[in-house]
Amino acid sequence: METYSSFNLNFEDPPDSLEINYANNNLTVNEGTKIRIMCVSRGGNPLPEFEWTLNGKTKLAPMSTQSIVYSVESTIDIVLKREHHGEMIQCQASNKVGQLKKFVNLKVSCKIKIKIICCFFYLIKN
């Protein structure tokens, strides 16, 4: 009588590559503009999960995350404020084997409001 044993091989790999797509990269964007940033991770087993941060501290909620044949993409939308100028948005794709990070630097143009008040003083002699 022959005996057969079966087993499963599960290979685990870190994400292979990470790409961040931002239409306004290297451009200055006006304050109040809504921008969309997409992060695409290819490969990895298990497929990676995403984490978005602003300046490495504040976590941002993704608008959507979806898997498409050996890749995962995550998208965020953000309305730019003057305090975002010079800040960094980072996308991190990670699974239990490894992680990859990419970032974009934000350049925000602000409208400066100047209020000029003119006062005239008249000297009245008695």
Image (spheres, rainbow, N blue to C red):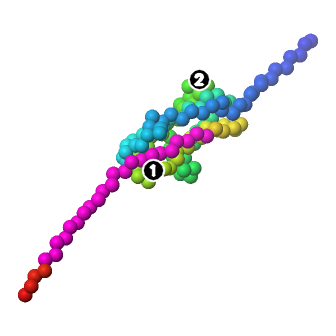
User: Between marks 1 and 2, how big is the CA–CA gap?
Assistant: 36 Å
* Residue 18 position in % (x across, y down): 60, 33
Q: Is residue 62 left or right of residue 46?
A: left
Task: Give the residue pinned by disc 2.
Answer: 69
* Amino acid identity at mark 1: His
- Is 82 situated above or below 35? below
Determine the residue positioned at 71% across, 37% down.
Answer: 97
CB-based contact (under 8 Å), mark 1 and mark 2: no
Left or right of residue 49, residue 96 in this image: right
- Magenta stretch, main secondary structure, is loop
Q: Residue furthest top?
A: 1
Q: What is the residue that sits farthest to the right in this orientation?
A: 1
Mark 2 is on which residue type? Val
Residue 48: assigned label: none
Residue at image mark 1? 85
Question: If the image is split into quadrants, where does the N terminus sit?
Answer: top right
Observer-nearest of 15 and 116:
116
Q: Secondary structure at mark 2?
A: loop
